[in-house]
Image: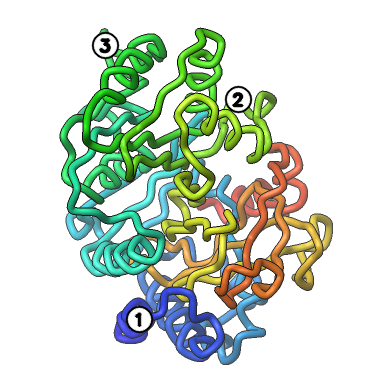
Amino acid sequence: MRYRRKLFGVKHAFDTRTTEDLFVLAMRENCQFHYDHCAPYRRILQHYQFSPDGLTGVDDLARLPCLPTLLFKRHRLYSLPRRRMLIRATSSGTSGQFSEIGFEPGGLLCGLEMVLRIGRLRGLFSPVPCHYILFGYQPHRGNRTAVTKTAFGATLFTPALSRTYALRYSNGAYSADLDHIIRAIVRHARSRFPLRMMGFPSYTYFTLKKMQQQGIRLTLARGSKILLGGGWKQFYTEQVDKQTFYSLAAEVLGLADADIVEFFGAVEHPILYCDCARHHFHVPAYSRVLIRDVQTLAPLPNGQPGLVNLLTPMVAATPILSVMTDDLGVLHDGAECGCGLDSPYLEILGRVGLRDIKTCAAGAAELLEKLRL
């Protein structure tokens, strides 16, 4: 896939303006590959009377059928045999169902280039060793979730002196031990090396809140950071706004806003959305975001809320080039941010229910049954 290689070789990670034509070429190339190698995906395109040749300009991206994440939770769609996949990662499956996405070597190489470029811009890489507190799952051979793999991968941004997990595996199940984590944080705060806390914002917040209630106040070594990713999941009703979180981190750990970095992504769309200095998710050159009307699925102009449709030609093993999430969001003009990046930025407003996704996302359940995938 030569256009994919060219796209992920773009040096400026957020150059969405001059890469429009290249992105369309890469998407058409990717669409044609999946059309030729994945029979269920081909039937979906034929159902909507869409051909890969129809991708000739940026406006055609909105016509490309977007597959709801629900489809990947119910069905395994592959465009390559499993023996050619280096990794098969799953979603967390908090609803009882989970997606399984395959990644071939070429797609993983593109992902590595993307992470290196975006990570450098955000100052994530350092030669200084760090201790790591991970508010996520301890790796286990039976755990193939993408969030676990990416969390461990992020501990390679610096040399890791230690890794302590909040969700530990024992007797066939995971359980949270926040007291264990608090003891580790207090211990590492006495070290001359930085501490990086990363993972689910919910468990991070619960830990900081418990430390506040216990009267624990720390000053971490210079270079310490909080890296947030994975969403609030089943704790969405307890989610707090960013400023409340940042204020708590400053009070308990002495960390400034600039020391907190947030990520957005999904196993069905493995693009790294890393917030800017003003904590906005700018769209990188390697993807595009469409906001669609919740009733008609028509694309909406910037500034209007709707369902979030994510597009990328990164992966050849699984047809995830256009995915409809269950997130509600708004796409803003890049100039509104003021951080210096011109690409639009995505604001996530919340999530819609599974019933709403069935209704809104082109009758996903009915389509699955009709096509007998």
In percent of width and height, residue 318 lies at 38, 60
Q: Which amino acid does the dot numbered 1 rest on?
A: Lys
Residue drawn at x 35%, y 40% is 224
- Which callout, 2 or 3, points at the residue further toward the start of the chain? 3
> Which residue in the protein does label 1 denote?
11
Query: Image height check: is 370 above or below 70?
Result: below
In percent of width and height, residue 295 lies at 83, 57
Q: The N terminus lies in which quarter of the figure?
A: bottom left
Which numbered marker is on residue 170?
3
The CA span between labels 2 and 3 is 23 Å
Q: Is residue 220 left or right of residue 163?
A: right
Residue drawn at x 56%, y 10% is 213
Q: Nearer the viewer, mark 1 or mark 2?
A: 1
Residue neighbourhood size for the residue with mark 1, other residues' Cα within 10 Å, grouped as few (<14), some (14–19), many (≥20): few
In percent of width and height, residue 285 lies at 47, 76
Q: Secondary structure at mark 3?
A: strand
> Which residue in the protein does label 2 denote?
235
Pick whichever, 220 or 163, lies toward us.
220
Is residue 35 something that shows in the picture?
A: no
How many numbered marks, from 0 up?
3
Query: Image height check: is 112 above or below 182?
Result: below
Coloring applied to the structure: rainbow
Q: Which amino acid does the dot numbered 3 rest on?
A: Ser
Q: Secondary structure at mark 1?
A: loop
Residue drawn at x 58%, y 45% is 70
